[in-house]
Amino acid sequence: MNQTARTALRFALVASALGLVPQARAAEPITAGTLRIETPWMRATPGGAKVAGGYVRVTNTGTQADRLTGAAITTAGRGAIHSMTMAGNVMKMAAVPDGLPIAPGQTLELKPGGLHLMFEDLKSAPKVGEPVSGTLTFERAGTVPVTFSVAPIGATSPNAIAPGAPAAHHHH
Ligand SMILES: [Cu+2]
């Protein structure tokens, strides 16, 4: 690594430690034990909303089963795990009190329209571009700090620019 790259890296590390670059490294998976946690994200909410959905992908790279048992963010009173199913043509959400198992080699995906985190009793509305600190709790891996990026209202993916707009391209 040359001097310029080293300086840039040092700046990036310091800046992200200070929270100056909120979106930086958002795409980097977080490793917690044998779990790989990818793209925790939320959607902005309409004014006055008391709940917000949260989404994440978790892959179990180990040999022992784990279980997602809870989630929290600093700006909500509590977090729950919800399922979403169709009852006739009505979408119904229900709490998943026992959490979600993640077998060895399995990827658990929480996404709009399916399993999701539900943050309730919001103290402040999530806003696009203002990541929210939180935690995910697992039976084996314990409580893991994560940062939820915030996509626009109604976004169907973490990189969406606006509802219905194509997802932003991702360069590495
Ligand atoms: Cu829900």
Image (cartoon, grey):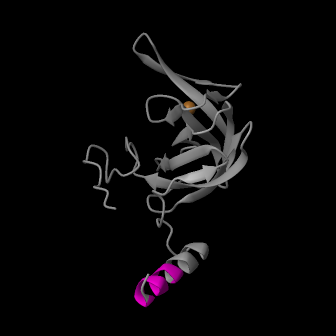
> How many labels, in total?
0
The picture places residue 83, in percent across and down from the top left corner, at 55, 25
User: Which quarter of the figure has residue 124?
Assistant: bottom right
Vertical relation: 32 (above or below) 25: above
Specify whether residue 4 is painted magenta.
yes
Whether residue 123 can be seen here: no
User: Which residue, as the protein is rendered here, is positioned at the far top?
Assistant: 88
User: Which quarter of the figure has residue 138?
Assistant: top right
Q: Residue at x 48, y 87 (%)?
A: 7
The picture places residue 19, in percent across and down from the top left corner, at 57, 72
Viewer-nearest residue: 166 or 170: 170
Q: Residue at x 55, y 76 (%)?
A: 13
Viewer-nearest residue: 11 or 91: 11
Ligand 1 picture quarter: top right
The picture places residue 97, in percent across and down from the top left corner, at 70, 25
What's drawn in magenta, residue-wise? 3-10
- Name the image quarter holding the N terminus: bottom left
Q: Main secondary structure of the magenta part?
A: helix
Q: Give the side of residue 146 with respect to residue 169, left or right.
A: right
Q: Residue at x 44, y 35 (%)?
A: 112
Q: Residue at x 66, y 42 (%)?
A: 71
The picture places residue 94, in percent across and down from the top left corner, at 60, 23
- Name the image quarter holding the C terminus: bottom left
Q: Give the side of residue 15 with respect to residue 159, left or right.
A: right
Viewer-nearest residue: 48 or 73: 73
Specify whether residue 79 is painted magenta.
no
User: Which residue, as the protein is rendered here, is positioned at the far bottom?
Assistant: 3
Viewer-nearest residue: 33 or 123: 33
Whether residue 62 can be seen here: yes
